[in-house]
Image (cartoon, grey):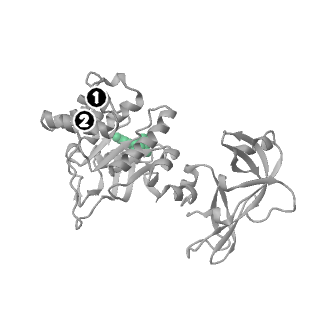
Amino acid sequence: MGDSEAAATTEGAATAPSSSQPSGLDLIGLTKVFPGGTVAVDDVNLHVDHGEYVVLLGPSGCGKTTTLRMIGGHEFPSSGDIVLDGESLVDLEPDKRPTTTVFQHFALFPHRSVLDNVEFGLKMHGVGKGERRQEAMKALEMVGLESLADRKPRALSGGQQQRVALARVLVTKPKALLLDEPLGDLDRLLQLRMRVELRALQRQLGLMFIHVTHNQEEALSMADRIVVMNDARIQQVADPLTIATRPRNELVARFMGDNNLIRGKVVERTDTRVVVESDAGVRASAPTDEAGSPAVGERADLAVRAAAVRVSDAGGGEAATNSADCNVTFVEFLGDLVKLHLDVGGERMLAKVAGDQYPALRGREGDTVRVTWEEEDVQLLRQ
Ligand code: ATP
């Protein structure tokens, strides 16, 4: 049986935990070292509540799929524990876990009707025909496909096929749905629609969803919380707004994209702010209340989002702190917004401004502009 079929048969009835029991999923020191020595997942600790939509986000090879596969039972941890509502899952086979995995290639059985496809998981567990039909129809109603129950999968659109795949796993009433790049195969327009549909369905069901993707926008648009992974480790766990505007370290700032990095030395430091000067002479200040933040003379890196950078004509004396005079290297029009690619003393900067400014910016390559930003939009990155 392939992974997708196995996925369709994994279940275990959900039982509501009593209030005195630990509730939700805990990954505790979860580690996976593959034969040959690749450390795919390194000491991952995470708590996920019931009803929460969590996205594991990171570049290819960062360990997100291996983490999901360990939760689903498709990979055995080298060390650590996976605990759901107080019960360790690590010694349970995938089909004995109260989790269900939706793989990217959710192969439906082409020769069976939509209803038969959805019933399949229950049939494998000896559920009688009458109950099976009833439960499968309920699951199809949840995804809005009850009127297509008799169709074969090939007579459905890509989005409808995906909803059948979801109904097929929902019918088993898992406590947690594990989704491995669930939108990866779909064309962009369908992806955008399915983001909304999947998120709405999750809210309606109130079920724990753990979703793996390398797509930043998908994670920002769908998650209650994003877990950014890199090099087998968690780099930051936070809500989408925090991940987008307050990256914790350089890895997160770079991976989320469109962050300007100002890397240099601390030239001023008070209890509430730190001023950093880059090698190219750009000075930026960031708020800080951290006792441990760097002292004058020490290295420090700051991040400021491209969207927080304003652009005006150059001139009027030397650029002050939180501003710089830059050479425009490329004006990139993207419809709703314009990305201005800039160079300041050999360092690259990026400004994102509203698309209606394009007529004024078009053809400005080679010009010098002044960029400015607010201290409150600058983030001191952890080393
Ligand atoms: P992608 O987005 O490309 O799927 P990922 O972030 O999900 O990447 P994983 O698939 O979890 O990453 O892989 C993490 C690391 O473990 C990678 O270096 C990968 O090559 C390695 N790896 C994964 N599966 C195995 C395996 N079965 N045997 C050996 N190494 C593996």
285 versus 146 height, above or below: below
Image-quarter location of ligand 1: top left
Residue placed under numbered mark 1 in the picture: 149
Tag 1 secondary structure: loop
Compared across the picture, whether 193 is left or right of 375 comes to left
In contact (CB < 8 Å): disc 1 and disc 2: yes
Question: Is 310 in front, or is 233?
Answer: 310
Q: Is residue 38 visible?
A: no
- Give the CA separation, mark 1 to mark 2: 8 Å
Q: Residue furthest bottom?
A: 271
Q: Is residue 339 visible?
A: yes
Question: Is 357 in front, or is 215?
Answer: 357
Name which residue type carries label 2. Answer: Met
The quarter of the picture where the C terminus appears is bottom right
276 versus 310 height, above or below: below
Name which residue type carries label 1. Answer: Ala
Residue placed under numbered mark 2 in the picture: 137
- First of labels 1, 2 by sequence position: 2
- Density class for disc 1 (Cα within 10 Å; few <14, some 14-19, many ≥20) is some
Residue 120: image quadrant is: top left
Cβ of mark 1 under 8 A from ligand 1: no
Compared across the picture, whether 329 is left or right of 184 comes to right
Compared across the picture, whether 169 is left or right of 244 comes to left
Residue 310: image quadrant is: bottom right
The quarter of the picture where the N terminus appears is top left
Q: Position of residue 15 (x, y in %)?
A: 20, 54
Q: Residue furthest front?
A: 147
